[in-house]
Image (cartoon, rainbow, N blue to C red):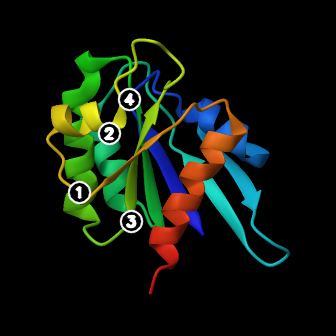
């Protein structure tokens, strides 16, 4: 099972992949990590290379060409100035992959200024079609919970 980890610069993508993924690899700027589910199954987390500044057109092309089972979209929940760009990212994923499971990961929930998942839902204007999950990217327990929730969506009949 392959999941793509995307988000704006500073949202915690690399920390998330490094926290949950084992056998990390970097190839052409792509970071990937593997998480074993059992002896026969594993999740591969992939993070595309990130230009120095957010380039929406470039990321749109990466998303368009993605052949993954699910998307993890990380948002820095302490940066409301970036929330609208996250909405564009979610719309892009839905435009190119309308049936691919996707969750919004509200990172940095350990920070006092972090917006809650409910506050994010209201601010982003998302309805119940996308799950918003709290997370701390460098905490293995919350990162694992996020992966499990996306796995449930991917594996549901």
The quarter of the picture where the C terminus appears is bottom left
Q: Is residue 105 visible?
A: yes
Q: Residues within 10 Å of mark 4 (few under 14, many from 20)?
A: many
Give the percent coordinates (x, y) of residue 78.
38, 17
Q: CA distance from mark 1 to mark 4?
A: 22 Å
Q: Earlier in the sequence, mark 2 or mark 1?
A: 2
Badge nearest the viewer, 1 or 4: 1
Residue at far right of view: 39
Q: Residues within 10 Å of mark 3 (few under 14, many from 20)?
A: many
Label 1 sits on residue: 128
Q: CA distance from mark 2 to mark 1?
A: 28 Å
Badge nearest the viewer, 2 or 4: 4
Label 2 sits on residue: 58
Q: Is the C-beta separation of discs 1 and 4 under 8 Å?
A: no
Placement of 118 over or under 68, stated as above or below = above
Q: Is residue 104 left or right of residue 56?
A: right
Give the percent coordinates (x, y) of residue 77.
38, 25
Q: Residue at x 14, y 41 (%)?
A: 125
- Viewer-proximal residue among 74 and 64: 74
Q: Is the C-beta separation of discs 2 and 1 under 8 Å?
A: no
Badge nearest the viewer, 3 or 4: 3
Give the percent coordinates (x, y) of residue 18.
70, 37
């Amino acid at each position: 099972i392959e999941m793509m980890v995307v988000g704006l610069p500073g949202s915690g993508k690399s920390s998330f992949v490094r926290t949950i993924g084992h056998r990390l690899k970097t190839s052409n700027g792509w970071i990937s990590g593997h998480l074993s589910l059992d002896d026969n199954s594993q999740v591969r987390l992939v993070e595309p290379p990130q230009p120095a500044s957010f380039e929406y057109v470039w990321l749109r092309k990466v998303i368009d060409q993605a052949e993954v089972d699910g998307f993890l979209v990380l948002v820095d929940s302490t940066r409301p100035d970036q929330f609208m760009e996250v909405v564009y990212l979610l719309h892009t994923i839905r435009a190119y992959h309308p049936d691919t499971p996707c969750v919004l990961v509200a990172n940095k929930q350990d920070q006092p200024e972090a917006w809650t998942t409910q506050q994010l839902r209201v601010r982003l204007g998302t309805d119940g079609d996308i799950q918003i999950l709290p997370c701390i990217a460098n905490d293995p327990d919350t990162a694992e919970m996020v992966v499990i929730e996306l796995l449930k969506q991917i594996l549901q009949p």
